[in-house]
Image (cartoon, rainbow, N blue to C red):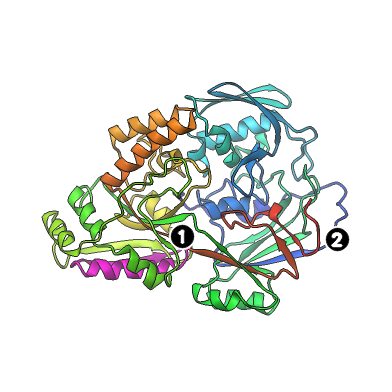
Amino acid sequence: MPIVALRRAGLCLALLGWACSGPQPEPTPSVLRAAVRADVTGFFPNPPAANESYTFEMNRWVLDAVVALDRGLNVVPALAAHWLTPDERTFVLELRPGLRFSDGRAVTATDVARSLEAGKRLAWPNDGYLSTLESVRVLDERRIEVCAVRPDPTLLARLAWGFVLPGDATAADPVPVLGTAPYRLEHWTRGQGFSFTRNPHHWGPPAAFERAEFRVVPDDEARLRLVETGEADLADFVPLEAWPRLEHAPGLRLVVGAGHRVLFLGLRVDRPPFDDPRAREGLDLAIDRRALVDRVFLGRGTVANQLMPRGAVGFVPDLPASGYDRERSRRLLRAAGLGPGTRLRLDGPHNRYVRDAQVLQEVARQLGEVGLRIEINAVDKGDLYDLLARAESSLFLLGWASESGDGADVFEVLFPPPGQSGRSSSNASGFVDAPLEAITREAQSITNLRERAAVLRRAFTRLAELRPILPLVVQPEAVVYDPRRVSWDPPVSLALRPRDLRPAGVDRP
């Protein structure tokens, strides 16, 4: 999600200038070859890296945090082997002994503290996940104390986004991408791809592959063909029309996710025309989400009326479905000054979500049926994030995936209060609502999960009433791979994570 300003110069040289030392491990040399639809926005924490889940997941090949999320999105140890909770606001984390960065230098509690502090102070791309962090204190060489501004039962999970780098490097410009994960960054050519090599100093089992190559192939059929011809081991964003063929293709395996990313329209509600609630409701009623699923996603996918998936903390099971009423839409739009022929620009990415360009076209078509004239501005995802950061879009397409499973993330990342919007957590809707802020503050301080969920349901109900965003659809997702070359234990998000992938026939460590 949100947002960064672009700053391109000098990054690649810094990324390539960090050599590893020490003996190499003994696993059989092997290379993972992945064909991916889009590039990362950057490598953390340097611009143009954005707060985007795909960018974060690719950075996890190189960077670790004190904790991690397993395949089921449960919190598990990472750099921290143990932790204690002296009170509802505090975690004391003990680092594993013998940790080293990929250049061989030792990892200390000071490195962790400086990395977390820099995430907030320097508005790094992870600052939204660290928004409730009040202080980080070094207790000794291996222990740190982390305190939240208020009781926050989700802080530990959010620390999974608190990437740890050498403390003395956090002030560099650009910051060297130097971590403790199974791999180290070998090369990145913007728009073409990136590669990783095994980190000989990783604290866990040696990386399963000696190298991993990610080749950016925007064309769906070309990306799929690389797997079918054996030139790539896997491909993401499998085109929907290819699913039936691949489900029975010999030698290939198609993994279809249940879907947990919600695509939505964002509205800039602090200025005309969407500062008028009638304009927002009129736009909402103009969209036939069932037709969107059928026409764009070939009947696959699910109509969405909220950002949280079923089972997440804050999901509202009885929230009314978004209506579709073309006549009422026209009346409301006219009353708000959006009569027939009104021109609006719809911004969105052409390389971030499943069929995102087609979603833009279908939304524009449907809004045209109520008299609006929509100009589609489909751009590279990085350019979209930059556009939103400059508050230059009034109507835009984005997606949200609840990776922590807690609804409070929506309000802290998508709608941070005024004065708290950093480089990555920009309130692209300009949305502020005092009653909703009070509800979310109440939820954030409740440690009882059932009570917290009840309060967050109130927050999402009010969000639906105010309509700063209009949920559209839970997108369907699929990845194809060759099990003769690769073994994969896919997480619920279908993210390509280093610990889930290994050469075929190699046992999981």
355 drawn magenta: yes
Location of residue 243 in the rendering, given as x and y in whole percent from the top left corner = 54, 74
Query: How many numbered badges does the structure rendering display?
Result: 2
User: Over which residues does the magenta segment extend?
Assistant: 352-380
> Which residue shows up at 53% across the image and 56% down it?
41
Q: Tell me if residue 164 can be seen.
A: no
Distance Cα–Cα, label 1 vs label 2: 37 Å
- What SS does tag 1 mark? helix
- What SS does tag 2 mark? loop
In the picture, the disc for residue 167 is: none
Q: Which residue is mark 2?
A: 28
Mark 1 or 2, which is nearer the eye? Answer: 2
Q: What's the residue type where badge 1 is placed? A: Lys
Location of residue 88 in the rendering, given as x and y in whole percent from the top left corner = 53, 23
Taking the image as shown, residue 240 lies to the left or right of residue 460, namely: right
Mark 2: few/some/many CA within 10 Å (<14, 14-19, 20+):
few
Residue 488 sits in which quadrant? Answer: bottom right
Location of residue 90 in the rendering, given as x and y in whole percent from the top left corner = 57, 23
Q: Which residue is mark 1?
A: 381
